[in-house]
Image (spheres, rainbow, N blue to C red):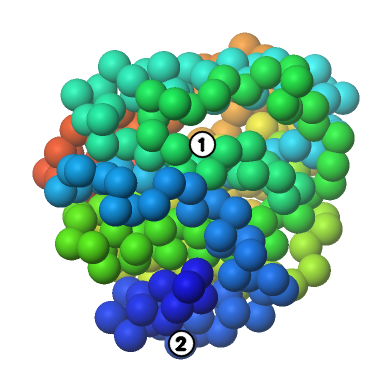
């Protein structure tokens, strides 16, 4: 069923052949998508839904830099901020870690668990392109599932990392760019990225190669204070985009500054 949802998206013109090829070459893609789909679409009673999709770096460098608690705090702040949004009942969230763990599949906002030292202990590598492609495959599939059931859907994605890709095996930056470009073309998706900069990475260049619009790239110094501030900026943008279709479009164009 999961792969069928991607084919539905292709048949309806939401993704191109290039994106479909980039996605379907991922090993065990159906299982990967299934891990993130969460609660069945037919349990939703709303005519519209917002999907918040978070890809969290859990590489060892986060821990070595002393930033693990700041990432946990940032995620928890984001969820708390959205719970104060007037659209809170229409928001579902998925949280995938960069080394393949799904902390939670699509879950109603009110039931999203906090990130804690028990469920987030960063110690892996940085397969940035592979895991971004897997997350976006899940976003496209869940969106298509809603559309197939007559529910309007908008999505907000955050990719966060403190390093460049080191360990991807199946997806390239260009594969990700094809997928991101197709998603943005539908005007139903916001795709953003946050880089925690220790001076070694040109995050704007890395994310540009992945197709992420510059206005949706946020860089922060690799320290707890700046990371928490960056999450605050993203949280404000996510809340604003979630309020209405008009504000989603306006925020999408303006990025973190608009």
Quarter holding residue 186: bottom left
Q: Residues within 10 Å of mark 2 (few under 14, many from 20)?
A: some
Viewer-proximal residue among 14 and 252: 14
Q: Answer yes or no: do the residues labelled 2 and 1 have beta carbons within 8 Å?
A: no
Q: Which residue is the extreme one toward the left?
A: 246
Task: Looking at the image, tell me whether mark 2 or mark 1 is earlier in sequence order.
Answer: 2
Residue at the location (48% across, 27% down)? 112
Residue for point 36% across, 79% down: 8
Q: Is residue 135 above or below residue 257?
A: below
Check residue 121 in the rendering and tell me which mark sits there, or answer none.
none
Q: Which residue is mark 2?
A: 17
- The picture places residue 97, in percent across and down from the top left corner, at 67, 42
Q: Which residue is mark 1?
A: 218
* Percent position of residue 6, x then y: 44, 74
Q: Quadrant of the C terminus?
A: top left
Q: Nearest the camera: 73 or 32? A: 32
| Residue 176, above or below 46 | below
């Amino acid at each position: 069923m999961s792969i069928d949802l991607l084919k539905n998206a292709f048949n309806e013109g939401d993704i191109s052949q290039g994106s479909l090829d980039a996605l379907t070459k991922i090993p065990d893609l159906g299982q990967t998508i299934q891990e993130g789909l969460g609660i069945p679409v037919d349990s939703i009673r709303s005519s519209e839904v917002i999907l918040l999709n978070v890809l969290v770096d859990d590489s060892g460098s986060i821990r070595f830099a002393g930033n693990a608690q700041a990432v946990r705090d940032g995620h928890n702040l984001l969820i708390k901020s959205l719970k104060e949004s007037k659209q809170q009942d229409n928001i579902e969230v998925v949280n995938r870690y960069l080394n393949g763990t799904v902390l939670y599949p699509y879950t109603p906002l009110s039931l999203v668990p906090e990130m804690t030292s028990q469920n987030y202990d960063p110690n892996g590598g940085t397969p940035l392109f592979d895991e971004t492609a897997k997350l976006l495959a899940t976003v496209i599939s869940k969106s298509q599932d809603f559309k197939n059931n007559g529910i309007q859907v908008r999505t907000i994605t955050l990719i966060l990392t403190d390093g460049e890709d080191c360990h991807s095996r199946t997806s390239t930056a260009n594969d990700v760019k094809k997928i991101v470009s197709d998603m943005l073309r539908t005007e139903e998706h916001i795709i953003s990225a946050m880089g925690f900069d220790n001076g070694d990475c040109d995050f704007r260049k890395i994310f540009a190669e992945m197709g992420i619009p510059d206005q949706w790239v946020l860089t922060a110094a690799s320290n707890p204070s700046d990371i928490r501030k960056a999450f605050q900026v993203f949280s404000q943008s996510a809340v604003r985009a979630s309020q209405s279709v008009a504000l989603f479009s306006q925020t999408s164009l303006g990025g973190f500054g608009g």
